Image (tube, rainbow, N blue to C red):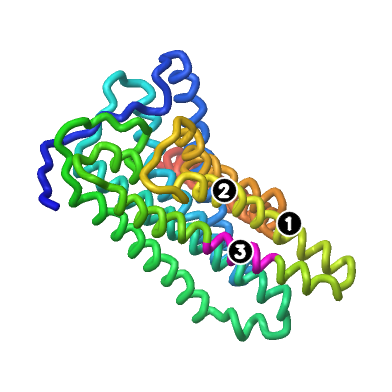
Amino acid sequence: MENKNNVTEFILHGLTQDKTVAKVCFSLFLIFYSIIILGNLLIITTIKTSEQLNSPMYFFLSYLSFVDISYSTVTAPKLIYDLLVDRKTISFVGCIAQLFACHFFGCTEIFLLTVMAYDRCIAICKPLHYTNIVNKHVCSWLVAASWVGGFVHSTVQTLLVIWLPFCGPKEIDHYFCDVHPLLKLACADVYIIGVIVAVNSGGISLSCFVVLVVSYAVILVSLRTRSSKVRLKALYTCSSHITVVVLFFGPCIFIYMRPSTTFSADKMVSVFYTIITPMLNPLIYTLRNEEVKNAMKKLWIRKRKVSSLWAGGTHLMVQQDHEKSRRFY
């Protein structure tokens, strides 16, 4: 396939064409993005500074929060800015970079969620061997494998698109550059590439989702012989993870488990896994987790003590300086 590319930039249709709706969406998504940044930074800071949150589950959660910040930052700032302008453009290079980053962080999050399900499965089904199976070395390798898997997936997706010829239409009916909208603009037969994309993206989403379902099925089976107190605690711990999985994997499977076909609902569905899920993750993992809430309270108390000591020290220094000045005069 000869690569004849006459397009230097693309025009995004954005989330909506209605200016009144766009202003409302601007305010909403600005608030959502602020919650994503502040909430996930709070989780990372709490986990890194707390001595109690040292289990593998929180190790993985800190990386999930970092990925959520990165993933939403790929699309949210551009979306928020475009809601206020009439002409929404993105350069060809910027579009390809956004495509790569979106699939890189998105796929990394999929693998991290799968790793977290594996962690919960071992912790509940084999509690006596948990620390030996999921040790610090294994955790580091699992996180590294998630990043590498995301990079390989994103590289394949990007290479499939970057060599396509774009010679005419350049309007993308979306608020960010994704595979399916770009395939519609290519001046070539993209059926085979669409199938490869579906196998690559949709296959990963579906296979990881199946692994997650199997993991929780194993957990439920193993809980039958446990006491009601243990069952309740285990289900309470896993319920937050299951909520995140459903919110993230459902839209991903809907979008990517098909060849190069786009629907009018794709933009709204994409909002769930690019913005809504990263925003809800901090709320889900903190409101339903007593350990994280207690660690955050201790962090807040420690911060207030440091602020009080700093303020008291500053006040004492000012008094000493004032006293020296009076003696001098």
Which residue is drawn at the image coordinates 72% and 52% (left, top)? 288
Residue 236, position as x, y percentages in the image = 76, 58
Tag 2: amino acid = Gly
Side (left or right) of 148 relative to 58: left
Residue 241, position as x, y percentages in the image = 64, 57
Q: Which secondary structure lies at badge 3? A: helix
Q: Is the magenta stretch mostly helix, strand or loop?
A: helix
Tag 1: amino acid = Glu
- Gap between marks 1 and 3, in whole Å? 24 Å
Which of the two discs, 1 and 3, sits closer to the camera?
3
- Is 219 above or below relative to 202? below
Identify the magenta region. 207-216
Q: Name the residue under label 1.
A: 290
Q: Callout 1 environment at 10 Å: few (<14), some (14 to 19), or many (20+)?
A: few
Residue 298, position as x, y percentages in the image = 66, 56
Q: Which disc, if any, is residue 54? A: none
Among numbered discs 1 and 2, the one appearing first in the sequence: 2
Mark 3 near mark 2, Cβ–Cβ under 8 Å? no
Q: Mark 3 points at which residue?
A: 212
Which residue is drawn at the image coordinates 46% and 13% (left, top)? 20
